[in-house]
Amino acid sequence: MTDKPKTVIIGTDGVPFEMIEHFAQTGVMPNTARLIADGTFAKMQSSIPEVSSVAWSSMITGANPAEHGIFGFIELHPNSYRMRFPNYNDVKAPTFWDKRDGKSVIINVPSTYPVRPMNGVLISGFVSIDINKSVYPPDLVPTLQSFDYRLDVDARKAHQSMDLFLEDVEATLQGRIKAYRYLWDYCDWNTFMLVFTGTDRLLHFLWSAYEDKNHAHHAAFVDHFRKIDEVVGEIAGKLTDDDLLIMHSDHGFERLDHEVFVNYLLAENGFLQFKQDTDPALENICPDTKAFALDPARIYLNLKGKYPAGNVNPAGAETILDEIEDLFTEFQIDGRKVIRDVYRKADIYTGPYIESAPDLILVANAGFNLKGKIGADALYSKGIFTGKHTQDTAFLLIKGPHNPEKLPNPPKVSDIPAIFM
Amino acid sequence: MSSALSHLDKLENQSIFIIREAYSQFRDVAMLWSIGKDSTCLLWLVRKAFFDRIPFPCLHIDTGYKFKEIYEFRDKYAKEWNLDLLVARNEEAIAAGMGPDKSKFNCCNELKTVALKQAIAKHGFKALYLGIRRDEHGIRAKERVFSPRDEDFEWDYKNQPPELWDQYKTKAAEEEHIRVHPLLGWREIDIWEYVKRENIPTTSLYFAKNGIRFRSIGCETCCGPVASEADTIDKIVEELKTTNISERSGQAQDKESDYMMQKLRSLGYM
């Protein structure tokens, strides 16, 4: 190890500012509490939409979606309604480790699959499928396997048994910790990034366990954060005052009251129609369709020339967008407004890929989880999930040499690379 | 041994029946020949069905990125078997520099799907023979022997004729073309046993060199080999009896998106 100042980033997927604050104050995360006392601790804005693929792509590139090209987990094939899943190959802006001098070790950042050669070590995160495409350099694969390293928590287990799911969350965390400890001394790096994603999985399924002290899984939930704090303490102990330690989340979380199906509302109001006697699927929309949504709440006009059954002329686009905006602005459930903001693409995105951006993007008020599912059988419902992402309650914690004055207020997830670049 | 032979005989008879039935229904047909083991087996059966004088063209969709062994094999046997070989290329996209480095999805779409659409439009084919098999991939389990596609190539798998007791629906609406799958019921191991029995030539890519071989071939840029010592047909058959690795594991753009879909669905993103 050289004595040059180092930068270490600890990512915790989905953890909200208030939760870190709460666990720091109640003694669950004492090491994090010390960093808060000595550093800068701020509430941070996620990307829009506030899903991991977009938020992490923004974090690692320091760019907005119209510059990096990732607008969600799902896109459509060109001139088609068939879905595809963008991955690292679709991230069009350089990452900070592409631009930075020296070696980087990057573990479990979402949206970095499949990996490609870089200066250091890259182990990709969600959605990684094949371990052989998830690890650079590839000769690290056997070592990682000897740690029982798991690319991701198998969230399907939560649909079967919470106990099995929690076992998998724990095993995944332990494999991740072993990998970080091994890679810490593996090469002479100057940037080290370790992301925990089990937090997001717990928050999706067990927000209820966080809120309710009598919940059967409350202790397991809190324990997971205690273990992460131990790693934070271990890492902080390896650093000097000249090194920079950044801890952050990509988006926040809160209680989920209702899942709200955007396409259902579009269909109910005549903007989206399916061919008779077919299943509701994008492939089956009929040419009378004016607009449809992809998850979570990205609304696309069914433009002529862009889609096989496209029928909206550019001249009529603005009127339809106004109608949809009015529909969602007024939309209420149980007397509460569902939508916090309706954005046009130009309101929030700038860059060379703005043409690929959705025409309208919705951000919800507290408690409402907007979904792009096609074929929901009701306008809103509640399923297995008890927590939902938030756009405006991510957190950022910085300890070490930095200038808090230079930080935008509030900071955005894409502002992070500028702190150390 | 005799039961293995009768199994292959049954498959062969059924495939030849389907091949002749489709030709008598449609006439304006072609068979897709990717030069891989399955479509080369299909070609062998087609030659048998028409006593070596195939009354329709063999269509090769050429992306320009195929293995050199594939081109050599194609040209050698097109001549030897006196085939009416049609090579379809999306020249416009190739000239514009489309390749897997741009995007694998776009590349497949432009150089395969669009090239095939162009060929169908140009020659007015009403039906196409393909060498796909049910055991290749989960989604193919839903395929039919006579499988309609609409003008956009969309396959409405939830709205297909049932094909019970081998009763095939061989009529197509005007805007449809029919895909005919004579090998649908064959397994990978059946193909290799048939290749051995009939002494059908296959490209050298399938046989292990330096510890690797290809189980499934296509574009050089997007196919990966599997670790294998099987350098003869017998060893390949032995390997298939014990492996639990899927046939298309080497193909870049295949079941990964199925897994991604599952993962996204389990977190509510679909």
Image: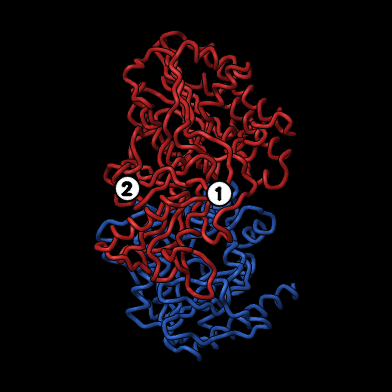
Chain colours: A red, B blue
Q: Nearer the viewer, residue A21 or B46?
A: A21
> Which residue is most to the front?
A335
Q: Is residue B68 above or below residue A419?
A: below
Q: In the image, what residue occupies the spot 45% across and 41% down?
A: A53
Q: Nearer the viewer, mark 2 or mark 1?
A: 1
* Place of residue B86 in the rendered image (x, y in percent of width and height, measured from the top left): 36, 76
Q: Can the viewer see residue A242 in this picture?
A: yes
In the rendered view of the protein, which quadrant contains the N terminus of chain B?
Answer: bottom right
Q: Nearer the viewer, residue B7 or A301?
A: A301
Q: Can the viewer see residue B68 in this picture?
A: no
Q: How many marks?
A: 2
What secondary structure is marked by label 2? helix
Q: Is residue A326 above or below residue A100?
A: below
Q: In the image, what residue occupies the spot 36% across and 16% down?
A: A404
* Place of residue A15 in the rendered image (x, y in percent of width and height, measured from the top left): 54, 30
* Place of residue A197 in the rendered image (x, y in percent of width and height, measured from the top left): 56, 34
- Residue placed under numbered mark 1 in the picture: A334
Which amino acid does the dot numbered 2 rest on? Lys
Specify few, some or many for label 2: CA neighbours under 10 Å numbering under 14, 14-19, or 20 or more. some
> Which residue is most to the bottom?
B24
Q: In the image, what residue occupies the spot 54% across and 75% down?
A: A277
The answer for how far apart the CA atoms under marks 2 and 1 are is 29 Å
Q: Looking at the rendered structure, which numbered label has been put on residue A345?
A: 2
Which amino acid does the dot numbered 1 rest on? Asp
Q: In which chain is the residue bearing label 1? A: A
Task: Give the side of residue A58 with respect to residue A215, left or right.
Answer: left
Marks 2 and 1 belong to one chain: yes
